[in-house]
Image (cartoon, rainbow, N blue to C red):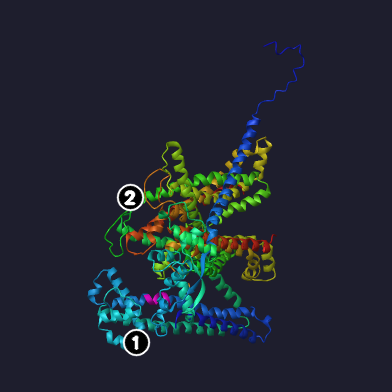
């Protein structure tokens, strides 16, 4: 019986349990619900919870644990000469056994008996069923595959029996507990509270998952490439190894990628900060409510546009425009119509990313500027300062910590931005300072290393996780520092 | 200086010398400062317009497609010369349909198909997609073999571009994708009304294709739909449950503090990191299939959760304490207070936040690239576990195509994406307007 069918049956049992529980409670008090401790629905829910929850927990534990148990017992039955092989080779053998097992399910008993001892024929027979094998299966594999199939089959049947048994048993247990003074509501609410706690710990689990998964994969990478070569290397040349070759090793220097990331982020901030900040000042201090009501949402539309659209805009409009205008300028000055700005360049990516960041800067700073108390402004204006003087000398200094926090958050967006740089920054990892030339970033390389055919053992693939953990650490530091500044600032006026 | 301060003069001259406090300079500075603000604001808005205009002006033509309407003779000789379709149904699938179409067009243009060069030029005017178009017609109704039917067929991408005026015709014909002869035919067909632009439904329903004229976002739309569904089903209940706990039940201690900081940080983690998480945990560790919209949905769920939690907590906070006090006073338990009274009142805010989170997830590309949704998928996925693409990923793939006609397709797909986003955001705004309560 497959898992979704079991879940469906559990749902039906649960519904039946709810109805039975509620009816039973009402019957116990002769239909006068005020004699019950809780409303009848709670008795129903109590029985349904007992019917479903333990069964589902058992189901999931079984689903996770049984493949592990089966795999270890099948591996334990490998012949001695296979056991002496390396872990990777044993893994390959096991992969083949699972394929054979999958293929054997499609064959009839007679067919298996006929070809069991003839590996070549087995391979062709399985190929005909759509299961391609990487090599000729060895005799022990066929036996192991049969064993695997048998154990899986037994496990399935046992699982069905145990899960459905737990469900019905739980329902009966809960049903027999029902009594007029039974505190069903309190029990049910405890379960609900528990599920709320579980839901909120998913946030923690996500972080743990991010850190753990990236650390383990990055650790694999660092066994192949020393950490200092990665963090301090100045050459990025991963040499894409063809699948299976594994021999050629490239150089994985983080420095050019990191500098590219920071450079492009810096150019983006160069555009975004003045424009965003001045828009925020204008909207919060000068603009009439009507202008504000139109301009603020319009700017925020910029934040709602997917970054892939910005990337396409950079690729097809801004990049070619900058290239053409540079060749015109060059022609006017020197007579040589060669472009000095590449279509994919630090400037293109930085400029478009700057546009994307404007709304982040403006809406964050707008909130902070508006939060500066009215009394400070009134005091300054009353002493004869003009509005701009008030803003420059009183409001901005008061808002400065908050604005710095906002800018740090914006900077972390710039560092982690992917699609714009993938399309507009170029892929060549170079160490240079000319903003008109292409450079590449950490995020571009993560995408480059992980699209296409993957082999989860080569450093070429695993390096993406080392890059990812670096990126995660940088943005985490920026954000925590920004949060710290913003929180500290808030306390001043409260 | 005794002559100046003369005691005889008595009254000093009434010439009021105001101290120069630089008022002009200061007012000029004031005006400048204000002008900077206006300039900055207009800069942002102008670029928004420019961005939208550049996409729309490049993309609106994608919703029209050049097609040739002509009588096609479904000749038995070409499709099924040995008359074996009754015994071998495969025959109809593999028949040489492009020749059928070419012959029909050649006949319309009065070109002899024996002239190899001219025949090749004629067949280049038709899309490779005609093979599928004609095949589907014949397979659906084999009786049309031997008859002549009027059929509307896709013109090739180059003819499409030329007809829409996107090819520079001043370039000499060696450097152009279509030659003068084909151009003349095109004008001839267009004058006779056979060749015309029609509404392009293909862009909405077709799957991936290496031919721009036959490529569409159908598969991507279904993939994106599955993912949005998964995000909604998972992220909304989990997010609401987490917010209720944090806002209403959680004691103030180190653990809840940790969760708080954590959620704020997760909201700012670069999306590509979620892609790495999905690849390592869902694909590599749990063994879920790559390129499946199920995995994409899970990754986007994790990414959207912080947004929903933050919005939900704000909505719960906005419900006045008097509601809670009244419910508790009437004897409701805390759980009943929240689920029967607070939550329904907070629902508009929660849904608004959810829709905005979904819109964000719909436009997200980077994490989907990592879990392998960059795939050439021509068939509709039937379940979320089948390989599929997503709308933004399709845009990314088309943006990387070299052919000129794909720029138009890409912009068209972006317009579709933006329309969905506008729809969702307008929905969120309406929802807020309609149901928002102020206390």
Q: Is residue A80 left or right of residue A411?
A: left
Q: Residue A345 at x, y = what percent? A: 43, 48
Where residue A437 sits: x, y (%)?
41, 46
Q: Which residue is mark 2?
A: A235
Q: Which residue is mark 1?
A: A108
Residue at position x 64%, y 64% from top?
B348
Q: Residues within 10 Å of mark 2 (few under 14, many from 20)?
A: some
Q: Quadrant of the C terminus of chain B?
A: bottom right
Query: Magenta segment, which residues?
Result: A62-67
Q: Position of residue A255 (x, y in %)?
A: 37, 49
Whether residue A304 is visible: yes
The foreground one among B92 and B417 is B92
Q: Chain of mark 2?
A: A
| Separation of residues labelled 1 and 2 (CA atoms) | 57 Å
Residue A63, magenta (yes or no): yes
User: Magenta-highlighted stretch: main secondary structure?
Assistant: helix
Task: Give me the chain letter of mark 1.
Answer: A
**Where residue A42 appears, x then y in whole percent?**
61, 78
């Amino acid at each position: 019986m497959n898992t979704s069918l079991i879940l469906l049956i559990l749902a039906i049992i649960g519904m039946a349990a709810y109805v039975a529980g509620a009816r039973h409670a009402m019957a116990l008090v002769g239909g006068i619900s005020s004699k019950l401790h809780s409303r009848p629905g709670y008795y129903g829910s109590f029985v349904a919870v007992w019917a479903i929850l333990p069964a589902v927990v058992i189901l999931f534990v079984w689903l996770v644990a049984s493949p592990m148990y089966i795999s270890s017992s099948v591996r334990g039955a490998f012949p001695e000469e296979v056991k002496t092989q390396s872990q990777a080779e044993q893994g390959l053998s096991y992969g083949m056994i699972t394929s054979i097992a999958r293929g054997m399910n499609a064959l009839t008993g007679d067919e298996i008996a006929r070809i069991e001892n003839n590996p070549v024929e087995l391979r062709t027979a399985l190929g005909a069923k759509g299961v391609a094998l990487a090599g000729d299966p060895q005799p022990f594999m066929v036996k192991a595959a049969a064993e695997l199939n048998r154990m899986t089959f037994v496990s399935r049947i046992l699982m069905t029996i145990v899960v459905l048994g737990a469900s019905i048993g739980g329902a009966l247990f809960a049903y027999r507990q029902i009594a007029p003074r039974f505190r069903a509501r309190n029990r049910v609410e405890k379960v609900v509270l528990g599920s709320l706690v579980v839901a909120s710990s998913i946030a923690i689990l996500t972080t743990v998952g991010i850190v753990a998964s990236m650390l383990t994969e990055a650790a694999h990478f660092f066994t192949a490439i020393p950490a200092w070569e990665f963090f301090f290397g100045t050459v990025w040349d991963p040499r894409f190894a063809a699948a299976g070759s594994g021999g050629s090793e490239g150089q994985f220097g983080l420095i050019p990628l990191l500098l590219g990331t920071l450079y492009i982020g810096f150019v983006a901030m160069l555009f975004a900060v003045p424009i965003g900040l001045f828009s925020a000042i204008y909207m919060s201090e000068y603009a009439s409510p009507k202008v504000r009501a139109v301009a603020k949402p319009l700017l925020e539309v910029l934040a709602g546009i997917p970054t892939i659209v910005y990337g396409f805009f950079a690729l097809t409009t801004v990049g070619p425009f900058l290239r053409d205008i540079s060749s015109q300028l060059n022609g006017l000055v020197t007579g040589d119509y060669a472009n000095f700005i590449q279509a994919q360049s630090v400037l293109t990516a930085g400029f478009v990313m700057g546009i994307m960041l404007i709304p982040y800067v403006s809406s964050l700073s707008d909130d902070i500027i508006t939060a500066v108390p009215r009394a400070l402004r009134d005091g300054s204006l009353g002493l004869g300062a003009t509005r701009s003087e008030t803003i420059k000398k009183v409001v901005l200094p008061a808002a400065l910590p908050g604005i710095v926090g906002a800018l740090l958050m914006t900077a972390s967006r710039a560092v982690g931005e992917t699609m714009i740089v993938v399309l507009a920054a170029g892929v060549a990892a170079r160490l240079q300072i000319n903003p008109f030339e292409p450079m590449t970033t950490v995020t571009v390389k993560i995408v480059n290393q992980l699209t296409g055919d993957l082999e989860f053992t080569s450093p070429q693939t695993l390096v993406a996780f080392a890059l990812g953990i670096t990126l995660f650490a940088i943005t985490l530091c920026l954000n925590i520092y920004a949060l710290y500044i913003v929180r500290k600032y808030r306390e001043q006026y409260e | 200086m005794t002559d100046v301060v003369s005691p005889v003069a008595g009254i000093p001259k009434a010439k009021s010398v105001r101290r120069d406090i630089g008022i002009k300079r200061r007012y000029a500075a004031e005006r400048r400062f204000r002008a900077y603000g206006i300039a900055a604001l207009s800069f942002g808005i102008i670029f928004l317009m420019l961005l939208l205009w550049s996409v729309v002006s490049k993309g609106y033509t994608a919703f029209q497609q050049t097609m040739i309407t002509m009588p096609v003779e479904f000749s038995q000789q070409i499709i099924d010369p040995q008359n074996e379709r009754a015994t071998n149904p495969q025959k109809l699938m593999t028949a040489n349909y492009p020749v059928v179409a070419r012959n029909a067009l050649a006949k319309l243009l009065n070109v002899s198909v024996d002239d190899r060069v001219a025949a090749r030029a004629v067949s280049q005017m038709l899309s490779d997609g005609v093979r599928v178009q004609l095949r589907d017609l014949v397979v659906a109704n084999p009786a049309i073999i031997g008859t002549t039917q009027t059929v509307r067929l896709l013109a090739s991408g180059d003819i499409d571009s030329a007809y829409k005026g996107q090819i520079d015709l001043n370039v000499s014909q060696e450097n152009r994708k279509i030659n003068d002869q084909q151009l003349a035919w095109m004008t001839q067909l267009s004058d006779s009304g056979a060749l015309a632009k029609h509404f392009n439904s293909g862009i909405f329903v077709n799957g991936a294709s290496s031919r721009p004229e036959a490529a569409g976002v159908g598969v991507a739309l279904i993939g994106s739909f599955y993912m949005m569904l998964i995000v909604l089903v998972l992220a909304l209940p989990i997010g609401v449950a987490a917010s209720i706990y944090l806002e209403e039940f959680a004691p103030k201690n180190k653990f809840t503090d940790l969760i708080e900081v954590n959620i704020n940080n997760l909201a700012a983690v670069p999306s590509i990191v979620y892609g790495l998480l999905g690849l390592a945990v869902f694909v590599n560790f749990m063994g879920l299939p790559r390129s499946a919209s199920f995995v994409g949905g899970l990754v986007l769920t994790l990414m959207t959760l912080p947004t929903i939690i933050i919005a939900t907590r704000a909505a719960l906070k906005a419900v006045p304490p008097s509601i809670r006090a009244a419910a508790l006073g009437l004897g409701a338990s805390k759980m009943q207070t929240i689920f029967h009274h607070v939550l329904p009142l907070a629902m508009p805010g929660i849904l608004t936040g959810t829709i905005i989170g979904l819109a964000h997830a719909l436009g997200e590309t980077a994490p989907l690239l990592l879990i392998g949704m960059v795939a050439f998928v021509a068939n509709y996925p039937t379940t979320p576990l089948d390989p599929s693409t997503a709308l933004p990923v399709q845009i990314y793939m088309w943006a990387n195509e070299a052919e000129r006609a794909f720029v138009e397709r890409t912009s068209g797909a972006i317009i579709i994406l933006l329309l969905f986003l506008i729809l969702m955001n307008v929905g969120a705004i309406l929802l807020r307007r309609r149901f928002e309560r102020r206390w």
